[in-house]
Amino acid sequence: MLLALIAYLGGVLTILSPCILPVLPFVFARADQPFLRSGLPMLMGMALTFAAVATLAAVGGGWAVHANEYGRIAAMVLLAVFGVTLLVPAVADRLMRPIVALGAVLALSADSEAGTGRKVLSSLILGIATGLLWAPCAGPILGLVLTGAALQGANAGTSLLLLAYAAGAATSLAGVLLIGGRVFAAMKSALGAGEWIRRGLGVAVLAGVAAIALGFDTGLLTRLSAAPTNALEQALIDGAQTQKPTASVVMNDGAGAMMMAAHHPPAAASALPVEGKLPSLAGATQWLNSPPLTAAGLRGKVVLVDFWTYSCINCLRTLPYVRAWAEKYKDKGLVVIGVHAPEFAFEKNIDNVRHAVNELNVTYPVAIDNDYAIWQGFNNEFWPAHYFIDAEGRIRHHHFGEGDYAGSEHVIQQLLAEAGRTGVAGGIVNVSAKSAEAAADMADVQSPETYIGYDRTANFASTDDAVHDTPHVYALTPKLALNQWGLTGNWTIAGERAGLDAAEGSITYRFHARDLHLVLGPGAGGKPVHFRILVDGRAPGVDHGADVDAAGNGIVTEQRLYQLVRQNGQIADRTFEIQFLEPGVQAFSFTFG
């Protein structure tokens, strides 16, 4: 809402620029004519110009996200260009000169037809000309909106910002039409202030480019909404048995969701209250395995909505059951929808998600919720979260985190029976999960999910404190206590991750659990990074995870969760070390099971 207001004000202010002066005489010439036949068509023509720009942005902007890091670099270059055009109007004049020339031709054409009786058409052409003649001033502002949106993907939010901008510009023109010459005189006196506003915006834009280049923007939404929430988690746990989550959206981590699951009672077969209606699914930025689905189109079906993200260990451990339910009941009226709501910035990359969906054998529809629109529509707070919707489109049950799979399947069976489905198989699915999808040994888990980026980290135990966003050589504290961890080597610690700047760096963690996982990503351009792990100073042997061999060797080839340790013997406090042989690796978070 705030961005829309800023865009609206930007639209209002752009009229206070010298580049609007050439078209104002044509606008004033229509100030005394009927608004519906003259003023309104002109404003519609201007809106059409903005709509064309928006369409180009929607089509062309997707490449920036599609290319991930390369797209971000290109977008930053564009942002820098727009910042310079705000600071130095002469640059904007030179870049936009062909467009301005076209606008002038159209404006003259519209003026020549004003007396022919075709006022509507001529006013429409004038509106298009107005949009083009504004290019040196509106172009930089629109470019900022569109390129900034390209970093997050072309979506409904982009259209809203453009609509707000166009509304602001139309408001200014409407004032010109209604008040006439007095507005013109006021604008002349305000031109100097308008130029200083432009220059200030230019400085802010270039500062923003520097912030993006340094990684300050990465995962901003997640950092704002997923701040440390231990106290809140406990309060939610205490109240979860008696109420549905409140409207506040708190992105909880998988560990918190698992704790919630341990306290969540099985659903009673005869008592499924109505918790609300199935919210709109229109906020999905893309769909996999299916055309877009709608709440209206799902009427008559029983729906299971599963909020997940592909690097979340708790989500991975629920997937075998969700897949089994989708297969068992697909011919009886059950539709499973996986809503992929990213936790880390790399999980917004559609190619990463598509690859994960294929690797994890997810064949049911997946809604890409990069803007968290569906997440917020459900007032959701957890990964994973399951919502059960009946054939009338009503939410009848929810379950957060792992566990109670039998209770969840009984809910599915009951809702199918209520919908009049016959021949629904009874019993419970038999799931045999492997690797990271296997159920955790919760009786022996004494280590919490631990983030490596400075936004949410805890128990960092290198000899120096974490230095934010700057390369620094770290050394390990001589003796780690349980659940302490540290870095060795040259690392840059950012908000949601740490990146290794030179070879021979390592991460060490003192943990207590059967399984240890680490979310990792390769170097720039996807360059693989080799590593080896040690447990208590030795190769893991039979205690190696699915992504390493018995000697502890492995390789980071993609951004995902890697299972590094699965102990077979007695569980005790262990010291885990991962040594990276090449630079560039990115480390995000530890999870245990």
Image: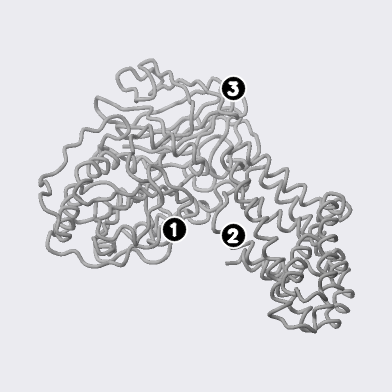
- The disc, 2 or 1, on the residue closer to the chain's N-terminal end is 2
SS of the residue under disc 1 = loop
Q: Which labelled disc corresponds to residue 282?
A: 1
Q: Position of residue 254 (x, y in %)?
A: 37, 46
At x 83% / y 55%, what residue is drawn? 87
Q: Tell me the SS state at disc 3.
A: loop
Q: CA distance from mark 3 to mark 2?
A: 45 Å
- Mark 2 and mark 1: span between their CA atoms? 14 Å
Q: Position of residue 281 (x, y in %)?
A: 40, 57
171 to 405, vertically: above or below: below
Mark 3 vs mark 1: which is more N-terminal?
Answer: 1
Q: Earlier in the sequence, mark 3 or mark 2?
A: 2
Q: Quadrant of the C terminus?
A: top left
Which one is in front, 567 or 33?
Answer: 33
Disc 2 marks which amino acid?
Ser
- What is the quadrant of residue 564 in the picture? top left
Q: Which residue is mark 3?
A: 503
State how far apart marks 3 and 1 are (Cα). 46 Å
Local packing at callout 1 (Cα closer than 10 Å; few below 14, some 14-19, many 20+) is some
Point 78% across, 59% down: residue: 132
Instruction: Please say if 276 is above or below 400.
Output: below
What residue is rendered at 17% in x and 60% in y?
Answer: 419
Image coords of residue 71 (percent x, y): 63, 40
